[in-house]
Amino acid sequence: MSDSLKTKNVFLTGGAQGLGKSYVDALLAKGARVVFGDINPTVGAATEKEFVEKYGKDKVKFIEFDVTDGSKFEDAFRSAVEYLGYVDLMVNNAGFMIESLWEKMIQLNYTGVVKGTFLAYEHMRKDKGGKGGRIVNISSEFGLLDAMLVPVYCGTKHAVRAFTSSLAMGPDAKQLGLEYGVLCPGPADTDLLKNMDETKIRHPHLVTPEDLAKVTNSVERIQSGFMKLVLLEEMNGAILYVPVNEMNFYKIEKVNLGEDWPVKQEASSSTTSS
């Protein structure tokens, strides 16, 4: 994809604040037209006003909706298509982390991503009159690692990563003109990390402000990772891992650990990939 996005139209969920807002800003700065959704009408309207003043009224539009409401998500996608003409890039970003609300978190973090992906899939697929396009789903570093503090959140992000990677493996992806990518950022300096009590995470006594500071990315750093992924010349199957000290493309591989479990420490260096 060209470094310029002047001919590209984007639909992004969860774009009113935090990382989502930073993604919208970066896309607009590259020339894209963006429709972003969010459940918060007040913050969404304020973000739209800010970006209209910065980039122009024909460049950005806000739609209030909840990704866990399937019919409203469908209506929002249709509205985005009507406004933009066509969606070239779908970004499923909406999500949250509150372990005590685990059922809602599964619906938002995973089911909402699947819904958004398939809406874009049907719109973009070339065999049904679409022009092709890209779908970027936002996972987390906890889509690649295990995390005892946030087991349900971790599970949803593993699901997003595996779902997206599996679609990218499809033999029809190229024929349909579709590309799938996954962003796996580490913790970011947003509201998501504030007030780490027992409602948000398990075992909060194990998390100190000092420890949290060591692993926290700036919003700008993760924003740059997002754009690195979006602007790849060929994106299909790419997983970009953005922890605090590195930014690497990642690939999930099956690893044969042998017939013994637990694996003996001295045998760990002899593991093989298959």
Image (tube, rainbow, N blue to C red):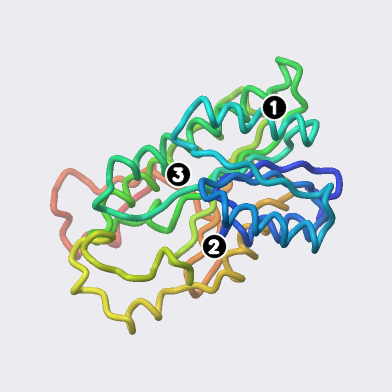
Q: Callout 1: few (<14), some (14-19), or many (20+) C-alpha neighbours within 10 Å?
A: many
Question: Which residue in the structure is indicated by mark 2?
Answer: 18
Q: Secondary structure at mark 2?
A: helix
Q: For residue 199, what is the image quadrant?
A: bottom left
> Alpha carbon of mark 3 to alpha carbon of mark 1: how far?
21 Å
Q: Is residue 117 above or below residue 250?
A: above
Circle nearer the N terminus (3, 1): 1
Q: Callout 3: few (<14), some (14-19), or many (20+) C-alpha neighbours within 10 Å?
A: many
Q: Amino acid at mark 1?
A: Met
Residue at x 32%, y 80% (from the top left corner): 211
Circle nearer the N terminus (2, 3): 2
Q: Callout 2: few (<14), some (14-19), or many (20+) C-alpha neighbours within 10 Å?
A: some
CB contact under 8 Å: marks 3 and 1: no
Q: Is residue 231 above or below residue 104?
A: below
Q: Nearer the viewer, residue 209 or 271?
A: 209
Circle nearer the N terminus (1, 2): 2
Q: Nearer the viewer, residue 63 or 256?
A: 63
- Which one is in front in this view, the residue at disc 3 or the one at disc 1? 1
> Alpha carbon of mark 2 to alpha carbon of mark 3: how far?
21 Å
Q: Secondary structure at mark 1?
A: helix
Apparent side of residue 220 relative to residue 232 in the rendered image (left or right): left
Question: Which numbered tag is attached to residue 161?
Answer: 3
Q: For residue 117, what is the image quadrant?
A: top right
Pinpoint residue 63: horizontal percent, then vertical percent: 63, 42
Apparent side of residue 128 relative to residue 206 in the rendered image (left or right): right
Q: Amino acid at mark 3?
A: Arg
Quarter of the figure that contains the C terminus: top left
Question: Which numbered tag is attached to residue 124?
Answer: 1
